[in-house]
Image (cartoon, rainbow, N blue to C red):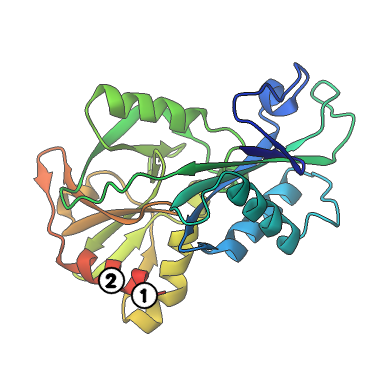
């Protein structure tokens, strides 16, 4: 089941007309949220990131689309699919209503909620990554939101699959490291964590935010820094973060292999939040 503007519909049904602006112009954004043990993980952070993105896109946010209402709609969708006891990926999409060309007839919003059960694929093998050079991601505030234009991520994912990688590193318009296909990237050197700043064009990741907010409590140092890919060769450890998979250890980049001692401790601290 999916939820389109409060109406529960079978996933097999057609739901959009040809004038849908998300399809025609990419006039949309989305959040991907982990549902686990009956709760939406970091729901408040996800909601406010989405609302901030909506304001950036000059969408008109109806009063009723508040945090409590949207949480109830997600929970309703999960219950209707009979998945309340499962571990799920929840995708919440917002898009402007149909009509207009580049100039929309209305700035009001519609929403779509999709839920999908996650397979338990825990592995200690680590990730294999490399650099995607074909296209660069713009260094601008729009790049911090999810879904405005994901084509670079799509192409990097295709590149990763073709080259038997888990993810590919995306560079920004100045050829500094930005993020990977679906994650923020972190480099550990001498027990200090380095990561690209939001000004690099990376997504303002929810797990990334948790690492910064909890760094003092955890006794770690996190530094935002412009980094070229050669710094991966000098790194002691590398890890990726996203809302669904949490903190993931990178095993190798090109011929370089990484340890996991620092990351093991960090993963445990994150699980305790």
Residue 119 is left or right of residue 235, and the answer is right
What residue is disc 2 on? 268
Question: Which quarter of the figure is the C terminus placed in?
Answer: bottom left
What residue is disc 1 on? 272
* Residue 130 place in picture, x, y as percent: 25, 36
Residue 53 in view in this figure: yes
Along the line of sight, the residue nearer the viewer: 58 or 14: 14
For label 2, the SS is: helix
Residue at 35% x, 69% y: name it: 271
* Residue 221 place in picture, x, y as percent: 33, 74
Q: How far is disc 2 from disc 1 in space, using C-alphas?
A: 6 Å
Residue 205 is left or right of residue 233, and the answer is right
The 10 Å Cα crowd at callout 1, few under 14, some 14 to 19, many 20 or more, is few
Residue at 69% x, 29% y: name it: 22
* Residue 164 place in picture, x, y as percent: 22, 28
Residue 134 in view in this figure: no
Q: Residue furthest right?
A: 105
Question: Which quarter of the figure is the N terminus placed in?
Answer: top right
* Residue 270 place in picture, x, y as percent: 36, 69
Q: Would you place residue 2 above or below residue 210 in this image?
A: above
């Amino acid at each position: 089941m999916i939820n389109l503007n409060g109406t529960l519909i079978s996933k097999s049904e057609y739901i959009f007309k040809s004038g849908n602006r998300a399809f025609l112009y990419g006039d949309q954004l989305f959040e991907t949220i982990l549902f686990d043990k009956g709760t939406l993980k970091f729901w408040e952070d996800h909601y406010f990131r989405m609302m901030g993105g909506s304001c950036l896109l000059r969408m008109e946010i109806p009063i009723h689309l508040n945090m409590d209402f949207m949480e109830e709609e997600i929970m309703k969708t999960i219950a209707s699919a009979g998945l309340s006891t499962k571990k799920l990926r929840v995708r919440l999409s917002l898009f402007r209503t149909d009509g207009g060309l580049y100039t929309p007839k209305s700035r009001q919003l519609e929403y779509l909620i999709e839920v999908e059960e996650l397979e338990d694929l825990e592995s200690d093998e680590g990730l294999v990554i490399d650099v995607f050079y074909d296209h660069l991601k713009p260094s601008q505030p729009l790049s911090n939101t999810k879904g405005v234009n994901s084509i670079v991520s799509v192409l990097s994912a295709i590149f990763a699959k073709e080259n038997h990688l888990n993810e590919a590193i995306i560079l920004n318009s100045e050829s500094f490291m930005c993020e990977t296909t679906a994650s923020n990237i972190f480099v550990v050197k001498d027990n200090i964590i380095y990561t690209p700043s939001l000004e690099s064009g990376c997504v303002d990741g929810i797990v990334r935010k948790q690492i910064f907010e909890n760094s003092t409590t955890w006794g770690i140092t996190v530094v935002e820094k412009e980094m070229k890919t050669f710094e991966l060769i000098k790194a002691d450890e590398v890890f990726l973060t996203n809302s669904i998979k949490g903190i993931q250890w990178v095993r190798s980049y090109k011929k370089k292999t990484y340890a996991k001692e620092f990351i093991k401790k960090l993963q445990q601290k994150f699980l305790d939040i």
